[in-house]
Structure formats: structure tokens, C-alpha cells
Amino acid sequence: MAVDLSVKFCGVKFPNPFVLAAAPPTDNPDMIRRGFEAGWGGAIIKTLSVAAEPVSLVYPMMAGLSYKGQRLMGLENIDLISEHKVDEWLPEITKIKKEFPDKVLIASIMASNKEDWQDLVHRLEDAGIDMIECSFSCPHGMPDRGMGSTIGQNPELTERTARWVKSAARKIPVIIKLTPNVTDIVAVARAVKKSGADGVCAINTVKGLLGFDLDTWTPYPKVGNKSTYGGYSGPAIKPVALKCVSEICNNVDIPVTAVGGLWDWRDAVEFLLAGAETVQSCTAVMAMGFRIIDDLCEGLSNYLEYKELDSVRGLIGKGLKNIVKHEELSRENKVRAFVDQELCIKCDICYVACRDGGHQAIEREEDRTVKVNNDKCVGCGFCPTTCPVNCIDMVPYKG
């Protein structure tokens, strides 16, 4: 079966749904060229500003969270927008579009007043940019100056500022990047829809504090002997991003591009099922390079063939109908834990987990073989999550 990976987002055709997010991998023209040569469908230039906007970076600006041997389960950054101003990029945008006419080049922008927002749009549009992404979502540094998440956490400010930008765009779509650091992201997405903007990007990083150095009591990343709250990204935030994307897609009629935790093609499929039309990546690219696009495209293509779908469109939003309110879930669904004895390595982890965190339903024999007492098991589903060799399943139970 011939599979078509191309998608349309806000009326713009992408050769595939994979887009480089506004981040360090898109902070100079040569990096974007290499990304396009590798096969990425689109790229978003790291957030640009007018020449008068001060950008004062600190170093180090990143620190990673390792968990039980997995490096970079999460990444915290205290980076700001690009030090490169819009003036530097204008001639490069024109060149890149001539070199890669089938790729989608998007500019992320940020400003502190109406005139600067609109000036950025006019100049970038004249240079040949395909789309504008507005960062209303940076969780650190910029909010102190009335920018970033200061806008995105307020539906009224979101609608007003998005309207400024959209009114300045003569031909190109405008998308608004949303922050997850809000009580109700749907309300903010509705404000974007009301403004007339064309789509939303969800989500930016989650505001967090990575941890402390136990010798110096300094948070990470350590800038001298101090630090600050930063933006948390990587695989750890995927559940937050999926929740935000699906909530928006279930409640607001507006196109969504997803970002937040994409690590492989399976993650991409999940975002598409949640309603996203394109998916963006940053931390995975930083950790493994532009080359991951090969695995992303091959994995998505093979999955579509497996599901007998000839295009990405066949996946978009197909999982939304299965997200329901808690009271709509079946109370008649009965399951029990089942242990595959041939795979079990007798590590006792499930036994301890059920004994001290469940219903004492997993019993241990003298030879450390475990079995499930179906009279005690209620089917909570905790024990499979603890098994290191995946030998436990939850199976239907009729009593």
C-alpha cells in the first residue's frame, strides 16, 4: 500500500507531519538547512524579536533529569528567546525558501507592544515566511517583562494580542503557542479562536524546579550558586501535552499542532489520535540529532500500512471519541491480574507492590512463584506497571 505522509495544517501543505520546534536546533539558518536536508517537513525559527528587545542569557541554562538509568527523562531550561534578531533572519528566510520550496518555514515571534508584534509580522511575511507562531507561553524570564506566559495565562490578553497579530498578517496563517501553566487551557484556546487566529500550538514547557544539589543546596541548572524556575520538557511531560491537545480538540474547532514529549513515532501517533494535525519535536532532536526523522517517518508509515490507512488524515482525532467523563465509564468491566509463569523471573516486585500498595491479592510460594488470588484481586492495574519483564496482564474476569 502506498502511504501518503503529507498533511495540511491551517491550509499549508507539509510533506510530513514532523516539525522542528522553536528551540536551539532552529537558532541558525544552517541548522534549519540540515534539518530540511535530513527530511523534516517543517521548522520553526527560534523565537525572534525586534532589535530593541534585550535578550540576556545565562549559562549553564539546561539540566537533565535522570531516572533509574534513563538519561534525560526530562530537561529543564532557563533559556530565553533567540539572541539573533529579526533583521539577521530576513535575507536567510528568502534564501531558505528558494532552496527548499516544498518545506514549511515558520517564524516564532514575541514582542512587548502592538507595534512590534505587527512590525515583525509584516517584515517576516515580506521575506517569504510560510506561517507565524506567536509565543504566548514562555514560563520563565519573559513574563517578568509582561511577555510570554503573562499573555497566555489570561484569555483576554490572549485574544487581544492574537487579534493584533492576525490583523497584520495579509496572507499567511497565524498560530498561537499556548502554555500548560493554566487552570483551563480550553478557555485560552477559545480566546484564540475568537481572535480570528488560524490555529494553536500546545504545549510549551511546564514550569518547574528540577531539583537541588545536595552538597551546595543550589537548584539546577546552577548559575554560580543560584538558579530559578525553568521550563520542563522531554518524555516526562507527554501526558500533560496529550491532555491539553485532546481537551482543545474535543472542545474548540481550531487546528492544533502538538509539542511536548515526542520521543518516537509511537508518541507521534498518540498526538495525532488526540487531534493534532502536525507534531513538533525539540528535546529528542537535541539528544539524538536531526537523524531521528528517518525513524519517525518509517515508523509512522509502517503503522499506517498495518492499520490499512493510506494517509495521516486517517489517524487525526480518531482517539477523541474514547475519552469520556468518569461517570460514563463502565462499572461492569471486570478484570483480574494474570501472571505468565514462563516469563516470570521471581523478583517479588509485584508481590511487594500488591502487599503494600494494593489488595494483598498476589501470593508468594516458598519457591518464590507468585499467583493471583482472584477473590482478593479487584483489577486495579497497578502490578503490571511494576513488572520489569512485562509478564503480567489484566484479563477479563467473569467471576
Image (cartoon, helix red, strand yellow):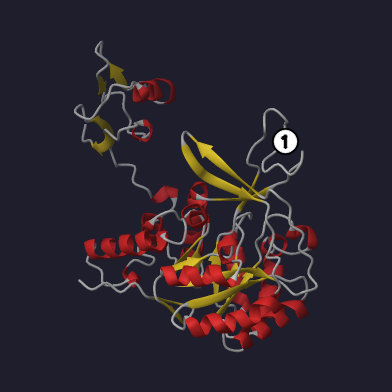
Residue drawn at x 48%, y 72% is: 42
The residue lying toward the viewer, choosing from 255 and 173, is 173
Q: Is residue 200 visible?
A: no
**Among all residues in the image, which is located at the extreme top?**
366
Residue ID for mark 1 = 218
Q: Is residue 304 left or right of residue 14?
A: left
Q: Position of residue 285 (x, y in %)?
A: 49, 57
How many marks can you see?
1
Position of 179 with respect to 299 (left or right) is right
> In x, y percent, where is residue 326?
43, 48
Image quadrant for the N terminus?
Answer: bottom left
Name the residue rendered at 74%, 64% in the picture.
147
**Residue under the point 19% across and 28% down:** 342
Looking at the rendered structure, the secondary structure element under dot 1 is loop
User: Depth check: 348 or 56 in front?
Assistant: 56
* 377 w.r.t. 131: above or below: above
Residue 325 in picture, x, y percent from top left: 44, 52
Q: Quadrant of the C terminus?
A: top left
The answer to whether residue 71 shows anywhere in this view is yes
Q: Amino acid at mark 1?
A: Thr
- Residue that appears at 74% across and 52% down: 58
Q: Rate crowding at label 1 as few (under 14), some (14 to 19) or many (20 or more) other CA atoms within 10 Å.
A: some
Q: Is residue 324 above or below residue 99?
A: above
Q: For residue 393, what is the image quadrant?
A: top left
Q: Nearer the viewer, residue 166 or 26?
A: 26
* Horizontal relation, residue 357 to residue 393: left or right: right
Drawn side of residue 112 relative to residue 356, left or right: right
Residue 356 image point, x, y percent:
43, 21
